[in-house]
Image (cartoon, rainbow, N blue to C red):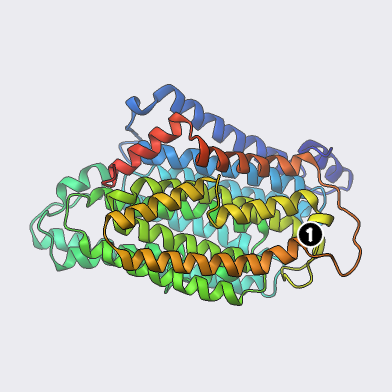
């Protein structure tokens, strides 16, 4: 069996520089995860929140939950990158700069998740974007640099709208004679309880801009082409890790304005979510590329999250469980898709058939990931979708309930029609089975285990964190 250290030894034998970068990235990722796990075990919920760095950083239930999730996913992605370096000379040759950018991205992610200042959080979202853009440009699709610039342009536009929203909030405070503080733990006390046009405009712009980062319609055009063109590990970083810092930004805004009249904001989330689900369902029906198919399914997940957040307290726990589950689902699907891409040299579904015969382990895991993405039991996404749908019914929004059920059914049928023949149909030409090592399998098995636990029995420490964050946005 090939270990990351053995891959490094092989790369050194070939005379490739930076062969130590892959194993070093795994060690750093493991240190991050162990460090935050030990920190939470020592502090528990009773020891939170904890502010430091002159109160610019905070460790509370929200930041702790997402720190644990994104660093668990990062460990799996880093193991994948290190193991792939042993079979890809191109990746091995570029491992040092890619590892450096990935590590810089993760440092910015960890700091951003702890940001206790809205402008600081905005800056860290921009910094993660700047770290990922060069990684997107290293993809092997047509014109990857053009795609990277497109991604950077859309991200900058979305964050510019968010910043404009912050300026509108500041203008609202100025007109009302209030000294505005963007410190999150002070902001709720400083914003006006009355609200005015500037405040509503600011909130609307901030959520619209962050919606663009989440892949919500109409600012979604960057997502499918970026997920397809980027290297598989970068697609996983985008979908399963960076996605979460934008979710945290939305949660922070809802926490600050929890006591205000935010009905118009919830309506905005509902409209964006319904529109995104509809667009995703149409695009999935036309998709003939499995990486794009995953991308459009990720868009649909963003739509479900937006609809769930618009419901408010009844669906809050379900939304958070859905977000956490999707981090593992997306990473599982993209890393498995990367293995198929390495063997078949294409992202198109048509040339692929009998994947479970050629890649037994990856083929089965891709099917498992697809079932989890579509909300089948016993995975956490199934329980989360049931909680969200129950919350929508309790809120009395039967139109949103009907639309969500209809669009998810269409996505289920269209995805199955594209994916399952690719996995199970007999191949047109004989291919010998490809040997897969346990090192490449280990992170994917870990993701599946996490998904099953979230759906069957969520460990008490994680369940308590989910409940605490749900309460912070008005849930119960």
Residue 271 visible in the displayed image: yes
The quadrant where residue 246 appears: bottom left
- Most extreme residue toward the top is 42
Residue behind mark 1:
355
- The image quarter containing residue 123 is bottom left
Element assignment for label 1: helix
Where does the N terminus fall, quadrant-wise? top right
Total label count?
1
Residue name at image x 48 percent, y 55 percent: 243
Q: Is residue 351 left or right of residue 54?
A: right
Which of the two residues, 445 or 29, is positioned nearer the viewer here? 445
Q: Is there any visible trace of residue 229 in the rendered image?
A: no
Q: In front here: 356 or 288?
A: 356
* The C terminus, quarter of image: top left
Q: Is residue 195 above or below residue 57?
A: below
Q: Residues within 10 Å of mark 1 (few under 14, many from 20)?
A: many
Rendering quarter of residue 73? top right
Q: Residue at x 22, y 68 (%)?
A: 201
Front residue of 7 and 19 = 7
Q: Position of residue 409 (x, y in %)?
A: 51, 66
Coordinates of residue 373 in the picture (x, y in percent): 56, 56
Can you give x and y, in whole percent of width and height, for residue 244 in the image? Answer: 46, 51
Q: Residue at x 91, y 63 (%)?
A: 430
Q: Is residue 236 left or right of residue 81?
A: left
Q: In the image, is 298 to the left or to the right of 467?
A: right
Residue 178 at x, y percent in the picture = 11, 54
């Amino acid at each position: 069996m090939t270990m990351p250290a053995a891959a490094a030894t092989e790369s050194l034998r070939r005379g490739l520089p930076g062969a130590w970068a892959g194993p070093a990235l795994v060690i750093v990722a493991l240190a991050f995860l162990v460090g935050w796990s030990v920190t939470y075990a020592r502090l528990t919920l009773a020891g939170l929140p904890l502010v430091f760095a002159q109160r610019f950083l905070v460790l509370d239930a929200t930041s702790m939950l997402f720190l644990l999730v994104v660093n668990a996913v990062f460990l799996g992605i880093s193991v994948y990158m290190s193991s792939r370096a042993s079979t890809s000379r191109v990746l091995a040759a570029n491992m040092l700069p890619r590892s450096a950018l990935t590590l810089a991205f993760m440092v910015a992610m960890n700091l951003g998740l702890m940001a206790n200042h809205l402008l600081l959080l905005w800056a860290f979202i921009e910094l993660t974007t700047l770290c990922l853009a060069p990684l997107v440009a290293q993809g092997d699709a047509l014109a990857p640099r053009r795609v990277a610039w497109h991604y950077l342009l859309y991200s900058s536009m979305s964050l510019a709208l968010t910043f404009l929203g912050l300026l509108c909030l500041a203008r609202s405070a100025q007109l009302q004679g209030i000294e505005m503080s963007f410190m999150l733990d002070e902001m709720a006390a400083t914003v006006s309880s009355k609200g005015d046009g500037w405040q509503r405009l600011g909130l609307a712009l901030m959520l619209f801009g962050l919606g663009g980062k989440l892949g919500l319609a109409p600012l979604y055009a960057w997502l499918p082409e970026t997920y397809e063109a980027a290297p598989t590990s970068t697609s996983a970083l985008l979908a399963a890790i960076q996605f979460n810092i934008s979710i945290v930004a939305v949660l922070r805004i809802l926490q600050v304005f929890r006591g205000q009249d935010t009905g118009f904001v919830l309506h905005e989330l509902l409209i964006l979510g319904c529109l995104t689900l509809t667009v995703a369902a149409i695009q999935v029906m036309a998709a003939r590329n499995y990486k794009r198919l995953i991308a459009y399914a990720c868009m649909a997940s963003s739509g479900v999250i937006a609809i769930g957040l618009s419901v408010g307290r009844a669906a809050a726990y379900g939304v958070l469980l859905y977000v956490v589950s999707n981090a593992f689902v997306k990473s599982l699907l993209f890393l498995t898709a990367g293995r198929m891409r390495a063997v078949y040299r294409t992202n198109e579904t048509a040339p692929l058939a009998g994947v479970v015969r050629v890649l037994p382990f990856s083929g089965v895991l891709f099917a498992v990931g697809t079932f989890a993405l579509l909300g089948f039991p016993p995975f956490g996404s199934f329980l989360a979708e049931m909680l969200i749908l129950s919350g929508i019914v309790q809120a009395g929004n039967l139109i949103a309930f009907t639309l969500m059920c209809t669009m998810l059914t269409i996505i289920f049928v269209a995805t199955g029609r594209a994916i399952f023949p690719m996995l199970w149909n007999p191949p047109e030409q004989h291919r010998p089975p490809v040997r897969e090592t346990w090192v490449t399998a280990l992170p994917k098995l870990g993701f599946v285990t996490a998904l099953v636990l979230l759906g069957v029995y969520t460990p008490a420490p994680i369940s308590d964190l989910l409940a605490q964050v749900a309460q912070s946005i008005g849930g119960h």
